[in-house]
Amino acid sequence: MTGGLLVVDVEVDGERVDVRCADGVVSDVARDLTPRRGETVFRGAAAVLPGLHDHHLHLLAMAARAGSVDLGADRVTDRGDLEHVLAAADAALPAEDWIRAVGFHERSSGHLDRWELDRMVADRPVRVQHRSGHQWVLNSAACRVVGLIPDDRERGHGDGGHGDGGPGDGGPGDVTGPDGIERDGTGRPTGRLFEQDDWLAGRLPLGPPPDLGPVSRRLAAYGVTGVTDATPTRSVVDLEVLAAARRTGALVQRVRVMGAVGPDARGVPDGLEVGPLKLMIADALPPDVDGLAERIDQAHRSGRPVALHCVSRVAAAVALAAWDTAGADPGDRMEHGAVLPPDVIERLAGLGVTVVTQPAFLVDRGDEYLDEVEPDDRDHLYPCAGLDRAGVPLGGGTDAPFGPEDPWVAVSSAVRRTTRTHRLVGPGERLAPERALRLFLSHPGDPGGPARAVAVGAAADLCLLGGGLRRTLEDPEARRVVATVVDGHVVHEG
């Protein structure tokens, strides 16, 4: 489209107007604009919002999931289901292929290690990802390939990604070493790896880059025009995969990255923006406050804020202690904040730290949380209103593919705070619908800040709704998105 875009007769900030986009920005917002020669005219929308920005997801893991075996609770309810699904995959795949399975959880499948996997699939390498994204289980064939028993295979693209998982989502046995590789009492690797995505990715057979096109199209159907990729990559190779998809148009959303890059954004490929540096606080490994504080200080001295991964009360305490030592800079974030009691919220407010939350986990896993987490933590799961009241900036993400990728599910969950079985989770933490939507409307570099506006000079990144804004907020669902515009181009029309 070269002649610009005119969206006719839509609601913007409560008024009926036309919206003109030219050269990648909103150039006019007024009544009764006259179409220009060569301009595309869009009719049929009732309201226009700024495009949604998902402040926390994992693009490569979303793409990799398409070629993975699903072990989620909807498909695997007991050990027999697990054995059946893996056996079916083994029978269907070519002999040289790995089985990559995702969504495993002990609640439905029981304990899993390499010997248990060997009983199900012995002759083909198998790697199974815990639904939290923080643990892999390998069978013996896979352990040999990746070098737990030495092997000389080529290295390949990373396809992991650190997800949330939330409180109560598993942890290591008591023999996990500081390297995250669990061993039994005799020193043998059990096949269980914790926080070892980079180590594992560097030892996998070479494969093609993941196809980000289907991921981008799904996001566009939700009205998402930008994302912050929260994978703490250590290599520009994975960043180049994202940049290449942006260049070819396979990935239409604007992308900010949290991976490690040099000062002044050195090493970031064209087409990507630099976000805060993601630092993990892993519940599966011993806490290291001094080491974390040193890494925070290094990031700050290089000009980058930090984003600290926290999914437990202990992790939040470690983060606060590290910030107390290193100091908090503008733009610093806490990712997830899965368990934040009032005293922790008060300290976050004093530090001026932003929280990026994933309220969709309440509907997706809330029943398990209520059954498994400590009683004292239940009212403090993924708090929202309490953070708002304390003045803590609050942005929203999905943590896809480890949580529901549809941001409208997160909006609805922040308002209702109910589980799949309609149990309430911290009803005092409910947000008003307008505020819940703003979780995804703030600037990519300022989650929790003021909502972006459909105004002259703003980026022409828009979400067009088939119903008015009030009707949408009464029942927030992705089906209300009729079109999505990025840089003045219609990238989705439904």
Image (cartoon, helix red, strand yellow):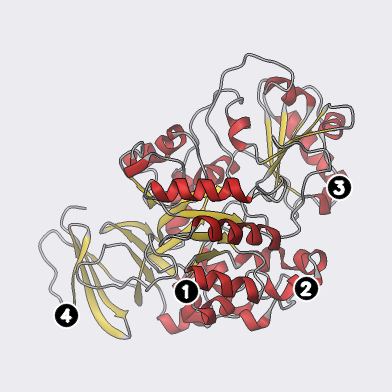
Q: Is residue 254 above or below residue 353?
A: above
Residue 344: which quarter of the image? bottom right
> What's the residue at 13%, 58% (across, down)?
38
Mark 2 or mark 4, earlier in chain: 4
Q: Amino acid at mark 3?
A: Gly
As measured in the structure, the alpha-carbon distance from the residue carrying label 4 to the one carrying label 3 is 63 Å
> Could you tell me residue 168's position as x and y percent?
76, 58
> In the rendered image, which residue does mark 4 sit on?
32
Q: Amino acid at mark 1?
A: Leu
- Front disc: 4 or 3: 3
- Front disc: 2 or 1: 2
Mark 1 or mark 3, earlier in chain: 3
Mark 2 or mark 3, earlier in chain: 3
As measured in the structure, the alpha-carbon distance from the residue carrying label 1 to the one carrying label 4 is 29 Å
> In the rendered image, which residue does mark 2 sit on?
376
* Mark 2 residue crowding within 10 angstroms, few (<14) / some (14–19) / many (20+): few
Q: Nearer the viewer, residue 184 or 96?
A: 184
Mark 4 or mark 3, earlier in chain: 4
> What's the residue at 20%, 67% (across, down)?
457
Q: Amino acid at mark 2?
A: Asp
- Is the Cβ of the residue at disc 2 closer than 8 Å to that at disc 1? no
Q: Secondary structure at mark 4?
A: loop
> In the rendered image, which residue does mark 1 sit on?
437
- Front disc: 2 or 3: 2
- Front disc: 2 or 4: 2
* Mark 3 residue crowding within 10 angstroms, few (<14) / some (14–19) / many (20+): few
> Which label was assigned to residue 110?
3
